[in-house]
Amino acid sequence: MAESAGGGVIYSLDVYQRPVTTGGHMGNYADVAQRWQRTIAAVGGYRVGSFTLSEEDLTLAELDWFYDEYLGGQVKEQAYMQPTWEGLLYEFRYVKGGREYRRTLDPEWWHNRVKVAYTYPDTEDTEQGALTYNPAANSFQDAGQVFTDWQRLAGDATYQISVTNSDGTNAWAFLGAAFTTTNANDSVYVWTDVECATAGWNGEVTAKTPSTYAISGVATAGARQTTAWSGNTDSSGEYGEMEFLITLGGTAPELATALRDKELVECAWPRSRKLGGGSMGEGRVAPATLEVSCVGFWATLNWQYRETSRVATASALLTTLIGLTEFVTVGRIDTNNMRVKVACEPEPIRLGDAIEQIILAGDLSGNVWQGGVYDGRKFFYEAAPTTVEYYELEDGMLCDLARVPVLPPLMRPGFLLRDLSAPGGGEPTGTATAWDDPAVAYVDEVKFIAPNTLEYHLLEEEESTTALERMIERGGIMPGPHY
């Protein structure tokens, strides 16, 4: 526990093993975690956090061990004996001996389940040689080609041929069976219909000289395709499953599969990467530091995709989406009967993005809703409040309705705040909601900066308002640890 000068407990910052393993306790780092800060948002819940470890407080061996072993571990803050924030150790930047190294769970650098979406080529590759028509046999010959890859032996034709003649005219037909004229399978029968019932060409071909041609799939040309998912179960068994969809333009199916497999080999594990170059020469080397970035479990909602579109009520669809995630479960989802849609065509959507869209949609009455992931990785969803819960005094101090100063680490967003210094104020005639009062604002994000600073952000504003540290003196809150 981090303590104040008077011995009062302010907060603890405990690190645990990764959630897919035993989750065993690895230590309390509150006394050595410099510049600890974290945010909570009305849409998202526990969002991000960060702190720095230094060789001034830990040995180099301890820093090495933290960097090597703790990525993806859990971090939990407790203040005044209450859980106040939790998340994952998401990214490390380690400066050691004048060099910088990085490990991260950023999905651009680490993913252990991969799929490729691509557009099937409009035309197949050809090796064109001497080209001729044979109108009598309703066939096409290319002395440098083998047509067996595209022939139709049964059922509807799979491929069609488009020919450009030397005089600029065009002809096209569906491909039938290949046969040999000069070289093996250098010729192919053509048909006017996909069922291959009527032999011949579509277009003017009599007495023409073909100059170029292209073969394309009847159903596949330009169609959107995907490979199957492929994953590294060892990695997902250690860190959790991170899906990654690669989107390409036109490419061959075998190339898309090869790219998927190559990507999985390169990114299935969160490798240590050296940043920048190096230098030689004398000079004092600063103490090693390890910058740690954290994310709340809200971030893990985007580790999986939704691939099937669906229309349902907001609360029902949120229940379904949360049920698809690996780490988060439903805490409470209040009923919202507004019908919403998760659109997954032409590309799948990440679960977290879909969930955020539903929350931001509000309801049929235009009310604001809020939702996020909080203690125990539980997801909560509810309408934003319609009554004032806190006051802001003239000196910037934040108090509850009894004028008692708040405790910074215990504050959560998603509340209405009345500014007691605001000019005017009062709800307009004919309205029954505090949202219309110009002296009232909705706080959609709070940031706790250890040991005792609170910042809060108002809806639709760009900058945060700082709850001054004077609240500590006014409210009798004991100061936090000194670093």
Image: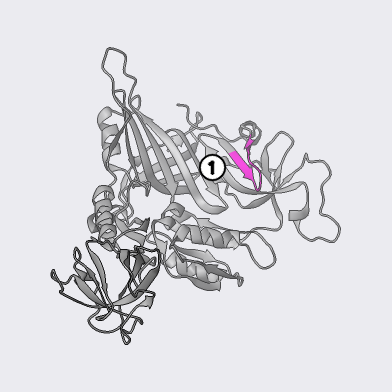
Left-right relation of 151 to 379: left
The spot of residue 429 in percent (x, y) is: 86, 58
- Extreme residue in the right direction: 429
Residue at the extreme top = 282
Is residue 418 placed above or below 218 in the rendered structure?
A: above
Q: Looking at the picture, tell me which residue is in the foreground, 34 or 403.
A: 34
Judged left or right of residue 477, residue 401 is right
Chief secondary structure of the magenta portion: strand
| Whole-percent x, y for residue 296 in the image | 45, 49
List the residue tagged with mark 1: 409
Q: Quadrant of the C terminus?
A: top left
Residue closer to the observer: 421 or 401: 421
Assess whether residue 482 is covered by the magenta stretch: no
- 392, above or below 222, in the image: above
**Amino acid carrying mark 1 in the image:** Pro
Q: Under tag 1, what secondary structure?
A: helix
Residue 81: % across, % down: 48, 46
Quadrant in which residue 465 is drawn: top right
Q: Quadrant of the N terminus?
A: top left
Per the rendered image, the range of residues in magenta is 455-467
Side of 401 relative to 324 (left or right) = right
**Residue 360 seen by the camera:** yes
Which residue is found at the position 57% from the left and 49% from the top?
A: 412
- Is residue 31 visible to the viewer in this orientation of the structure? no
